[in-house]
Image (spheres, grey):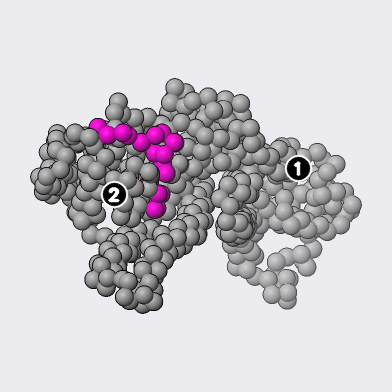
Amino acid sequence: MTASDNLEDWAGYGFSKELVRALFHGLRVGLYVVSHTGKILLVNPYAERLLDRPARQLIGADPHDLLHRNADGSPMPREECRILAAFSEGVDVRSEEAWFTRGSGGMVPVGVMAAPLPLGGEEMGNVVLFYDLSRHKAVEHKQAAALAALEKLTDRLSLMAETSTVLASTLKVDEALRRLSRLVVPRLADWAVIDLLGPSGDGVDRVAVVVKQGQSGVECKQWEGPLPAFPETSQAPMARVLRGGPAMLFGPKDLAERFDPEEYNVQRRRPYDELGAHSVIIAPLRTPRRVLGALILARYETSPVYDSADLSLIDDIASRAGLAVDNADMFKEQRRFASSTSHELRTPLAGLRARLEEAVLYPADVDPHETIREALVVTDRLETIVDDLLVLARLRAGEPAAYEPIDVGALVAKEVAAMAGGVPVHVDAGRDVNVLGNRIQLIRVIDNLLVNARRHADTRVEVTMGRVENSAVITVCDDGAGIAPQDRERVFERFVRLDEGRRREPGGSGLGLAISRDIAHAHNGTLTIEDSPRGARFVLRLPLTHRRP
């Protein structure tokens, strides 16, 4: 070594012992020097820490065999190593990302810079600087995760917008639901089914079945059609959702344990049997007033299992579908309402007008007092119709009503006791059977059923009230002519009056039973006509409450 090689001679370059020590010990970049034979001659302390290897393990080792790896941890062929290529060619190299293996067995991503280094005489070595990219990789991963989450959110927002567009594209309920099914398959499901409850809640109509085929969904109309209602005591997931329960998610284990084949008839079970399902979500088509049906989405084993985020999204889609169905029903109801109301009001008004015109044109031939009496009768009927229509409008609009715990047994007994004369009414009403409801509305239902039963009874009316599972059940039976099965739904429509009803009460409005059913629905209950050995049997079911009056 010449004198000029002494550290003191390097002072003119700004070197000092302290600076050299700082560069070697304090530099937060790994450094190793490789000899012309390809072995490590020197490492700095930071390289020891970053590689989790002591200097004695590094010095004398082949850096490629010891450190260089592919991103997956597999050995890197020497001919593919850019650092070795730079060594052999005597050129500089800079790698944005390489992977070194650590003494602990883990991997560390590093940025690498390598350059030729004269070692004296004709010997040429190389110096390698490398720095930790872990923090940068973590940031990249966070950014990638955030970007993926943003893309997923954007896709879901787009799906919700498309859902709203599809549901608003037609007022035909079945067509709107088929379009919705084709939208969610295959984006959210491998197959989809939509069931709608019947008007009285005692049956189900399968209106859409769509199955994934390639990149689109194909309708399976052969699986559509009416389905029987679940037994009232059924705890099957679908039955619970249709009774107002929340959306439900089922994984592979849940499907095996909680879907009882005996609870499902062949038609209802068919998608599960023929298509299979690895993960299922059942979501109610609900409105603030009632449940209209259910949306069932399923995935095969080849698709990801549904999670809570999927459950929330699909529940939202089902709710939008429920509101769309309800709006379409309301539109049709309004059209029917306008048509039937104008008809029912026009008939008595026409008669009244003719009678009054006759009195004006032929005053000598018409008794004015009789004309006024007839006009008052017609006016009373019109007033009754208008009052009933206002009640119906409020119920259909879902106007809030004051609800309280009510002992329905006591309420029934009280209303029967208040009825004077006429056909006798026999009551068997249990006490302490409580529901949450509006007292005035429930009184109206009970009075409507009692008055209707007495009107059609021959000798007596039987009223029973008790508990069945989670419902209060009020049954009103008469021993009259009864109602034919084909008319049992018609009588709940506005202004529908059968011949027997018109004969027994010519001035009735035909709105009492329609109002009664709407009140039952407003209380999350049902009002139906069931089989009876004789006469008509009306059954009112209301959910029980644990609160006491």
Mark 1 residue type: His
Q: Nearer the viewer, residue 422 or 489?
A: 422
Q: Residue 462: x percent and y percent?
A: 19, 34
Cα–Cα gap, marks 1 and 2: 103 Å
Looking at the rendering, the stretch of residues picked out in magenta corresponds to: 476-496
- Name the residue that disc number 1 marks: 64
- Name the residue that disc number 2 marks: 505
- 477 magenta-colored: yes
Query: Is the residue 422 above or below the residue 226 in the image?
Result: below
Q: Residue 312: x percent and y percent?
A: 47, 50
Q: Nearer the viewer, residue 231 or 47?
A: 231
Residue farthest along the front direction in this orientation: 364
Residue 268 left/right relative to 20? left
Mark 2 residue type: Glu
Q: Which mark is residue 459?
A: none
Residue 429 visible? The answer is: no
**Within 10 Å of the Cα at label 1, are there few (<14), some (14-19), or many (20+) other Cα atoms?**
some
Residue 357 left/right relative to 306? left
Q: Pick the quarter of the image with the N terminus.
A: bottom right
Q: Nearer the viewer, residue 193 or 441?
A: 441
Residue 440 visible? The answer is: yes
Q: Give the image quarter of residue 12.
A: bottom right
Q: Give the image quarter of residue 230.
A: top left
Instruction: Name the residue: 59% across, 41% down.
Output: 208
Q: Residue 348: x percent and y percent?
A: 38, 63
In the image, which is nearer the foreground, mark 1 or mark 2? 2
Instruction: Name the residue: 70% across, 43% down.
Output: 216
Residue farthest along the top direction in this orientation: 262
Helix, strand or loop at label 1? It is helix
